[in-house]
Structure formats: C-alpha cells, structure tokens
Image: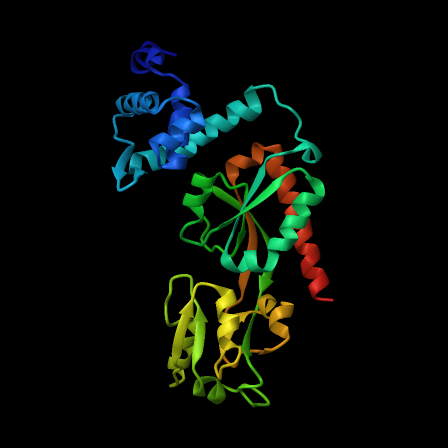
Amino acid sequence: MNKMGQERLDWKRIDLNLLIVFYRLYQTRSVSLAAQKCFVSQSAMSHSLAKLRELCGDRLFERKGHQMVPTERASELFPAVEQILNLVEYKVLPSIEFDPNEYRGVCKIGLTDYAEFIFGPVIYDAILSDAPHSRVSFVNVNRNSYKHLSEQESLDMIIGSIPELDEQFASQKLYTEKHVCIYDPSMVNIERVDIETFVSLPHCLVSPEGAFSSNVDKHLDAVGLSRSVTAVSRNFLTIGRLVSGRAMFAIVPEKMAQISLMQSQLSAVPPPVPVPDFDISLIWPKQSQLNDKAKWLKEALYESILRSIRESNL
C-alpha cells in the first residue's frame, strides 16, 4: 500500500467486531435485541453504535417509533458487511462439515401466502426426513416484504412468485402456474362459463395489495365489459370459503383449486378471459451459496417440490 493509502486508512480505528454489531442491528431493528444476540449489555451495544456512527460518518440507524430504522447509507452497507462476515465464517475460520442428520437448529423458510398453502406440508416432510432433529419456521413474505424479512429473520430460503427479484438474490424456477375460474355448482347452475356469464355475477379477488381490480378488468374494459368485484382478500383460503355457498366467481391458481378441501364442493374451469401465468421459484440470498446448510436445503426442497408437482399431475 502506498503512503497515501496508509494515511487514508487507519486500521487502529477499526474493530471488526463492529461489523457484527452492525449486522445484528440491521437484522433486529432494536438495540436491546441486538445486544441479546451479541451477548452484551444494552449500554455496550449503544456504545458500539456510537463508534459505528463516527467511523461511517452517518447515523446508520434512527429511532422511529419502537424501531431503529436503517438509513440509506446503512442499507447500502449491509450487503458488503454480510459478504465480509460470510467470507470469514465459511472461508477463513475452520469449518465443521454440515450433517443434516445431526442438525438441531431451525430452518427458516419464507413463503408467499399461496406457496405456504400449497407446499407447507411438503417442505416440512422434506426437511424432517433429512434432519429429524430440526425444527421448521414458516415466515409469510410477499413481493414487497421478502428482502426486508430475509435480512431481519435470517431466512434460509424463500419460495413463491416474486417478479423483478433484487440483485442480492438468486433463484431457480420450480414450475409455471396457470389459473382457473372457481364457483360453487350448487349456487351457479351453468354448463360452461362464457364471458357473458362471467361478468353477470359478483367476483372475489386475491390481491396482495388489496386492489379491487387486476389485468382481467383491463381486458374486460378493452372489449366493452366490466365485472363487479365485491370482495378482496390477501389470503387464498378466504377466497375458497367465500365462493362456497354463494353465487360468485373467483380466479385462482390451478394448484390451489386442486386441493382436496376445495375439490369436494367447488368446480374449476378455464377462465373465459386471458390471465397471465406466473412462475413459482426457489429463492435465496446469493451470499448463502457459501453455506453448506443452504446448499442442502436448496437441493432437498427443489427435489421434494418437483416430486409433489409430478405426483399431483398424474
């Protein structure tokens, strides 16, 4: 390093333990919780935060309500800090080979509402089959919350449909999901669902954002028609129960309609309007590729979910 570099970088001011402090604060959004995870007192954690602020020339975390919210600078720093800690843990320090059969920790799986409904039991069986002493934690995520929750909850894997994935994540497509139109045949006495019948009854709609319209309504508007959406839910289970016993329609993913509890009372037909398919993917933070636990989980979940899909299509 040249003289200018030596003057610019004063290593005596840098305590690498501060990276762990930063990482825990970013995860927990709480000084007290971060102190617990670092096994230090709350005052010691506050002192370390003051050092971090001085070192970085930024507030890093600002109190808003009951949370310590990261600043823009902290959000920029987090991927680099996480990368450094992962490199130290998996490339520098002596490693112990990961053995699923001996693992006694928690596997944290982030799932969209739909993915948890369809694949929760499959995921549980796949993990416990290889790691009988482990436990499984399902964390609800969506396209708006997955990044934050992955950091805060230290998620091992995420499963669902999340378009425009953040560059910090990698993914592997599991399958492409189609849609069907569901209704209760005891309440809607028809032989087929044409577009006129489709718009003649009220609809309920699944919407992560709570919107009362979708691309279906854009298509209907283009052909001079409209439908009446009288209920919106963020939960797929609610939609199935709403349709049951009522004269109404709902468009849902095909695999949801195949679940036995819905097949017993509802009919599913192709929708009379075009509805875009969507991909369900296995998603993970790129940094976890260094982690043997993550490698095992990715393989176990991928194979088990694909197998369940093949069996359901037989």
Location of the N terminus by quadrant is top left
| Residue under the image location 42 percent in, 77 percent down | 219
What colour scheme governs how the chains and residues are painted in the rendered image of this protein? rainbow
Q: Is residue 275 visible?
A: no
Work out whether 26 lies above or below 230.
above
**Numbered circles on residues, count:** 0
Residue sitting nearer the eye, 143 or 222: 143
Q: Residue 211: where, in percent of width, then height?
A: 37, 67
Give the quadrant of residue 18. top left
Give the quadrant of residue 103. top right
Location of the C terminus by quadrant is bottom right
Q: Residue 28: where, in percent of width, then height?
A: 39, 36
Give the quadrant of residue 265. bottom right
Residue sitting nearer the eye, 137 or 54: 137
Q: Is residue 137 left or right of residue 121?
A: left
| Residue under the image location 56 percent in, 90 percent down | 189
Q: Residue 261: where, in percent of width, then height?
A: 62, 69
Q: Is residue 64 left or right of residue 155?
A: left
Q: Is residue 96 visible?
A: yes
| Residue under the image location 62 percent in, 67 percent down | 259
| Residue under the image location 51 percent in, 35 percent down | 287
Work out whether 9 lies above or below 279.
above
Q: Residue 155: where, in percent of width, then height?
A: 51, 41
